[in-house]
Image: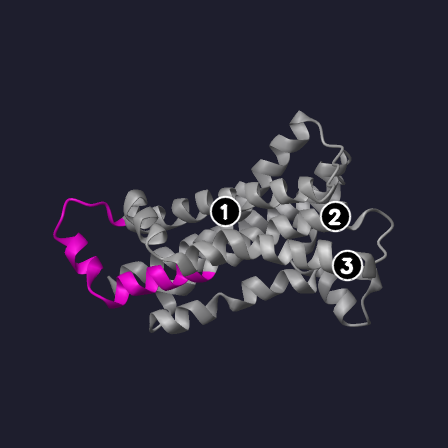
Amino acid sequence: MLRRNFKHIARNPTSVFNAVLMPVVVMLMFVYMLGDAFSVGVDYVDYATPGLLLMAVCYGLGSVATSVSSDMTKGVINRFKVMDVSRGAVLTGHVIASVLTNLVAVAAIIGVAFLLGFSPSASFLGWLGVIGVVVLLGFAAGWLTVALGLAAKSPETAGLASVPLVMLPFFSSAIVPAEKMGPGLREFAEYQPFTPIIETLRGLLDGAPATGDVIAALAWCVGIALVGYLWASSTFTKRA
């Protein structure tokens, strides 16, 4: 299943662009073109990189939802049912392929960030923590996206269902600090799930993660993964 999903990704240039190249384009736009317009107390590339790492995870989700929905609506699952294929492997293959694609996108973001002057203070353990949070977030977002794809009536609507996950980072502390936002939006940014995850990544890269942010980030990731897994399993059982 994993090999099958990678072949589909390789044959679809749009999904490769959305998952890997689009986050790099966004980084160049915000850091290289607009970075001087933001006053955040540090070099903007150092501030923005953690949020852009999270965006790199989110940008490839649309193609995952579309692929899952396509499997459900085009009869591929019926073929698998008469083969010696684990039903769980069908969904797990999509999730693992999504996580591995995320790691490629994150590596591209980090590489471009260093070219733009990124200078983190993270230790080796800090970098391991960053990778761990990214993998956990990718795993959680992958299961939730698979659930959205299974619940959608068509591949077209499945792609639209993941749009809120792509837009949500823009209403967090990814681009500017939440305290610089207007009333209402500030409170939303402070209490939505992506903000503590971004702040955890920012703290790990700075070498001083806040315990409260780490606990909140892990709790959100585990909660999202659990909801996505249970929802996806239930919907797959009903529709398959």
Compared to 104, does 65 lie above or below? below
Looking at the image, residue 34 sits to the left or right of residue 51; the answer is right
Give the x, y percent position of residue 149: 38, 64
* Residue located 35% across and 47% down the image: 92
Q: Earlier in the sequence, mark 2 or mark 1?
A: 2
Q: How many marks?
A: 3
Write down the residue under mark 2: 45
Give the x, y percent position of residue 12: 36, 57
* Residue located 78% across and 35% down the image: 208
Marking on residue 102: 1
* The magenta stretch spans residue 77: yes
* The magenta stretch spans residue 68: yes
Which secondary structure class fits the magenta region best? helix
Looking at the image, residue 234 sits to the left or right of residue 211; the answer is left
Q: Amino acid at mark 3?
A: Val
Write down the residue under mark 3: 176
Q: How was this image coloured? A: one colour
Q: Earlier in the sequence, mark 3 or mark 1?
A: 1
Give the x, y percent position of residue 30: 70, 58
Label 2, secondary structure: give it. helix
Residue sitting at the far top: 124
| Distance in Å between CA atoms under marks 2 and 1 | 20 Å
Residue sitting at the far left: 82
* Residue located 34% across and 73% down the image: 153
Marking on residue 193: none
What segment is highlighted magenta in the picture?
Answer: 62-87
Compared to 102, does 22 lie above or below? below
